[in-house]
Image (tube, grey):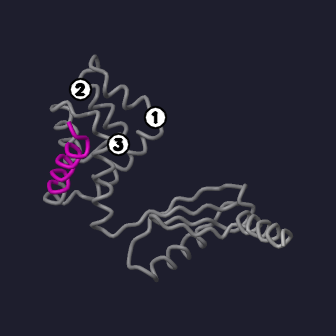
Amino acid sequence: MNLAGISSRYTKALVNFAREENQQESVYNELERLSQSFLEVPALLKALNEPSVLAKEKEKLVVTACGGSVCEVTLRFIRLVLHHKREKYLNQMAMTYLDLYRREKKIVIGELITAVPADEVIEQRMREIIQSYKPVTVEFSTKINPAIIGGFVLKIGTYRVDASLYTQLKEMKKQLLIENRK
C-alpha cells in the first residue's frame, strides 16, 4: 500500500478528532516526542514491526516513547493504529500530524547554530527578527558547532542564513585565489 496515502488518512482523522476534543496541542506535543524517539532510538521501529510483540506491549512502548503518559485522543489513535496493524507507518503519521499542525498554527521550525552557547536573549532577538518579517511562531533548537569559529547559522524552514566566520573566511580565501590568478 501507499505509505503517504495510509499516513494521510489516519492523520487527517486524528487532526479532526483532536480538534473536536480540543486536544490539538496535547497531541502535537506527544507526537513530537514520539517522532523524536523514533530518531533517537532506531530499535523502536524494529520492536513495533516485530510480530511476536503483543499489541498491549506495543501500546506501552509507544506511550513511553510519547513521554510516558498521553491524552485520551492520542491513546485512542495509538490503539486504532495498532488494531489495524499500521504501526510501521506510525512515524510517518506523527511527522505528518506535526506538519499539518504547524501549518495550521503558523509555526516555523528554526535552528540556530553558534560556535559557543547562545543565551536566551540572543534566541529571543532572533525570534523577534523572524517574526517582524512574517507573523509566525518560531520553535527554536540551538546547536553548538565550534567549527563555524564565530557568528551564527540560522535555518528557518527552507531558508538558511550563514553569518559564520568560517564561511566568511572561506569566501575571502576564494576571492584571494581568484585575484591571484589574474
Q: Main secondary structure of the magenta part?
A: helix
Q: Position of residue 155 (x, y in %)?
A: 53, 64
Q: Position of residue 98 (x, y in %)?
A: 32, 55
Lateral position of residue 84 relative to residue 154, left or right: left
Check disc 3 and give the amino acid type: Cys
Lateral position of residue 8 relative to residue 133, left or right: left
User: Within 10 Å of the Cα at label 2, are there few (<14), some (14-19), or many (20+) other Cα atoms?
Assistant: few
For the N terminus, the quadrant is top left
Callout 3: SS: loop
Would you name the residue on which mark 2 appears? 56
Q: In the rendered image, which quarter is residue 60 located in?
A: top left
Residue found at the very far bottom of the displayed protein: 132
Q: Which mark is residue 66?
A: 3
Residue pictured at 65% horizontal, 56% vertical: 144
Residue pictured at 79% horizontal, 69% vertical: 178
- Give the mark, 1 or 2, whose residue is nearer the N terminus: 1
Would you name the residue on which mark 1 appears? 41
Residue found at the very far top of the displayed protein: 52
* Image: magenta residue range: 1-17
Q: Which mark is residue 25?
A: none
Q: Position of residue 90 (x, y in %)?
A: 29, 39
Check disc 2 and give the amino acid type: Lys
